[in-house]
Amino acid sequence: MATEENVRGAFKIQEYYCREMDAPIYARLCTAIANGLTRESKTGARILDWTGEPTRDALPLRFIGGLHALVLAGVDHDLAAIFSGKTTDEGAIIATLGRVLMRHDDALMPWLDGPPQTNEPGRSGALIYGLLEVARRFGPRIEILEIGSSGGLNLLIDRYRFDLGGTIVGPAESPLTITPEWRGDPPPAAAIDIVSTRGCDIIPLDVTDPALERRLAAYIWAEKPERQARLKTAIEMVRQSRVRIDHADAADWVEARLAEPQALSVTRVLMHSVVWQYLPEAVADRIRKAMATSGANATADRPLGWVSMEPDRALAEQVVTVKTWPGDGSRTVIATAHAHAAWIRPGAPAAGRLANPLVEAAAQVRL
């Protein structure tokens, strides 16, 4: 069970992440929650008495998602003023939150029950960069297996168009072009042919359900309206042509998929983004072992790849990595990125960069 100090510290860590990601409204909100949350409401008490690890559980984002849902529903003018950036005084924010918690306690409580479902299509911009590296190594044809697919919006990666610093990838007729700020030399062009996409999730979501669409919208940070527009377009793409998501445990599913016959001259690629931190260690370890075993049997005609975008908490950045077989399956960091891939910086993290002391000891992702 976390201590109250741990919980308040989690909101301060999230405040740091928000500032690093150019989200000052959410940063102010996290500071106010860290300093002013009380046990007067059931929701406040549950947060302060959190039984898990609050940062790993994304507790701040669960709670803020619930608050944003109230804003989107138009139920509280003062709360809306905080989310629009009009109210910036910490005392005023704390007072509003106290009143909102008492008035909307029952509505907010369920938002703490599970991790946020961001379904961020922008992350495909980082993932496609990893897939281009795989294509350069083994050829253009790729079969994608994604774990933690949630609603499957990144399984549309074969249907999105990308502008990666001037390097164009994807179909010209796509209704959605993803254009991250590219902080470095553009990647060299490479032919890529994604022959299939398939995913799994322990709780797959039907993003075409209007109620779920509203929930996903609540998890999008209020200061990033372009993400709302991108979400709507991606969901409409799913309505037009569904994606394949299996209801399954990630380790069970990966083991089963790797055991299936693999087409000649097609690279099988495990893909995921901001998922690994939510996996129980036993599940993560089984996936590592399954990939290593399958990698040992990979051939030039039937290669295996692993592309991920996962957080380096100490730096408040995402790390984009690639592993491939045949070979030793060594982990190559090819880029760092904003959490929603608003920007991508090719190469490894800058040497000597200092992290915020609050997050120095945060657990690192081990793939």
Image (cartoon, rainbow, N blue to C red):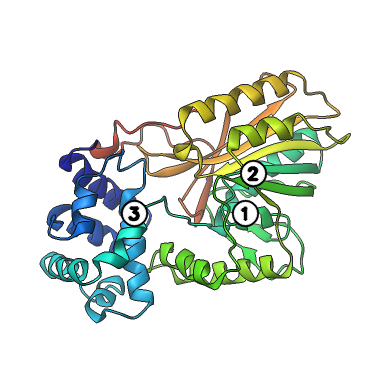
| 292 displayed left or right of 265 | left
* 72 sits to left or right of 166: left
Q: Which residue is mark 2?
A: 146
Q: CA distance from mark 2 to mark 3?
A: 26 Å
Q: Position of residue 232 (x, y in %)?
A: 57, 71
Asked which secondary structure carries label 1, the reply is: helix
In depth, the one of 335 and 312 nearer the eye is 312
Res 344 label: none
Q: Amino acid at mark 1?
A: Asn
Residue visible at 59% across and 49% down in the picture:
149
Residue at mark 1: 154
Residue 234, compared with residue 269, is above or below; it is below
Q: Earlier in the sequence, mark 1 or mark 2?
A: 2
Residue plotted at (66% across, 34% down): 254
Q: Position of residue 3 (x, y in %)?
A: 18, 38
The percent coordinates of residue 32 (x first, y second) are 18, 59
Residue 163 seen anywhere in this rendered image of the structure: yes
Question: Rounded to the nearest whole Å, what is the CA distance between mark 1 and mark 3?
Answer: 25 Å
Which quadrant of the rendered structure holds the N terminus?
top left
Mark 2 Cα-neighbour bin, 10 Å: few <14, some 14–19, many ≥20: many
State yes or no: discs 1 and 2 in contact (Cβ < 8 Å). Answer: yes
Image point 21% across, 40% down: which residue? Answer: 6
- Taking depth in this image into account, of 275 and 28 the one nearest to the observer is 275
Residue occupying image coordinates x 48% and y 57%: 118
Looking at the rendered structure, the kind of residue marked 2 is Glu
As drawn, the label of residue 112 is 3
